[in-house]
Amino acid sequence: MVAARVVEEFELDVNGRREIVRVAAGTPLLMVLRNDLGLTAAKYGCGLEQCFACAVLVDGEATTSCATPVESFVGRRIVTLEGLAADGELHPVQQAFLEEEAAQCGYCIPGMIIGAVALLRRERKPTEEQIRAALDPHLCRCGTHWRILKAVRRAAGQA
């Protein structure tokens, strides 16, 4: 016999909006974002918080969302890729990725953009080493790595 999971109500701040979700405690934030809020940019990759395909900004920092329970994010500011654009304009990092054609399959790109945004919030003019270090946890198998680096440099005003 499988024990039933008790559904609870959680209030989240997602992309500047107050969202009330009713899910079982322990449900990973990624599943809430995708299944309950329809925010599908963050992807399920490894499920072990090791590939960063599920990265979102939490209080300004790139944070994995695939395994951490939703209740850990109550009272924190969550921003997904969908929440970066403002007033119909792409975020400068999104625009730079577009201009540099930095996506191939695109699966890792939302997490890469989130990582780049977090880096540029901390460091306005990052060095090549800082860019590489910030993106190092983001696993990617396609061949656009040099374009991704160029896009981050462009967004930082260095390209």
Image (cartoon, rainbow, N blue to C red):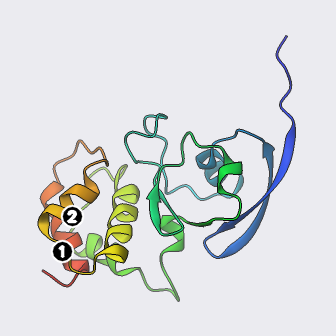
- Categorize mark 2 by other alpha carbons within 10 Å: few (<14), some (14-19), many (20+): many
Q: Residue at x 19, y 58 (%)?
A: 132
Instruction: Tell me how far mark 1 sits from mark 2, CA to CA.
Output: 8 Å
Quadrant of the drawing holding the C terminus? bottom left
Say above or below: 53 vs 74.
Answer: above
| Residue 56: percent from left, percent from top | 49, 59
- Categorize mark 1 by other alpha carbons within 10 Å: few (<14), some (14-19), many (20+): many
- The kind of residue on which mark 1 rests is Arg
| Residue 6: percent from left, percent from top | 87, 36
Task: In this rendered view, identify the residue nearer to me: 74 or 106.
Answer: 74
The answer to whether the residues at label 1 and label 2 have Cβ atoms under 8 Å apart is yes
Q: Residue at x 28, y 70 (%)?
A: 97
- Residue 4 visible: yes
| Residue 5: percent from left, percent from top | 83, 31
Mark 2 lies on residue: 131
Whichever of callouts 1 and 2 sits on the residue coming sooner in the sequence is 2
Q: Which of the two marks, 1 or 2, is nearer to us in this view?
A: 2
Mark 1 lies on residue: 153
Task: In this rendered view, identify the residue nearer to me: 152 or 122.
Answer: 122
- Residue 148 visible: no
Is label 1 in a helix, a strand or a loop? helix
Q: In the shown orientation, is residue 71 left or right of residue 63?
A: right
